[in-house]
Amino acid sequence: MATVNYSVERITTEKDPAHVVSWVGLATGDDGTRLEMPGSADRTAQVGGTFGGATCVIEGSNDGVNYLVLTDPQGNNLSFTSAKIETVTEITRYIRPRVTGGSGVNINVHILLRRNL
């Protein structure tokens, strides 16, 4: 049970400033260091790796203490048991991944964040 730090890749194009934030090597019981980037309205989460029966959720918080699972545009929880890409509906002050269950787990989460200009 650890808090896994993220790395940030800045994408600079003429019209679409964006970032890809990655938490790599999440295991059972791990969560990701919270990311504070509320100005990025467009968010897409890609989750992959070895799940081994684990579930990875994408959570958000506005107070940095109480986290809730975020949803996709259809209202489904962002809860992954296999590799998938989903849009994140809510814009929260903080966002992070969290992994529960499974064995032999090695999950990577990449979230694309784009600021609307």
Image (cartoon, helix red, strand yellow):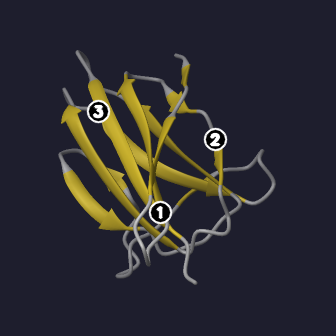
Q: Nearer the viewer, residue 90 or 102?
A: 90
Disc 1 to disc 2: CB gap under 8 Å: no
For badge 2, the amino acid type reads Arg
Residue annotated with mark 3? 54
| Distance from Cα at disc 3 to Cα at disc 2 | 20 Å
**What residue sits 47% from the left and 23% below the top?**
29
Question: Label 2 neighbourhood size at 10 Å, few (<14), some (14-19), many (20+)?
Answer: some
| Distance from Cα at disc 3 to Cα at disc 1 | 30 Å
For badge 1, the amino acid type reads Ala
| Image vertical order of residue 1 relative to residue 117, above or below | above
> Residue 31, how many percent across, how many down?
52, 31
Residue annotated with mark 1? 18
Q: Earlier in the sequence, mark 1 or mark 2?
A: 1
Q: Nearer the viewer, residue 95 or 51?
A: 95
**On the picture, is 90 further left or further right than 85?**
right
**What residue sits 44% from the left and 74% below the top?**
16
> Residue 32, how many percent across, how many down?
53, 34
Q: Earlier in the sequence, mark 3 or mark 2?
A: 2
Q: Secondary structure at mark 3?
A: loop
Residue found farthest to the front: 14
Residue annotated with mark 2? 34
Q: Nearer the viewer, residue 71 or 95?
A: 95
| Distance from Cα at disc 1 to Cα at disc 2 | 18 Å
Q: Secondary structure at mark 1?
A: strand
**What residue sits 66% from the left and 65% below the top?**
92
Mark 1, mark 2: which one is toward the viewer? Answer: 1
**What residue sits 68% from the left and 65% below the top?**
38
Q: Earlier in the sequence, mark 3 or mark 1?
A: 1
For badge 3, the amino acid type reads Ala
**On the picture, is 38 further left or further right than 83?**
right
| Image vertical order of residue 96 relative to residue 19, above or below | above
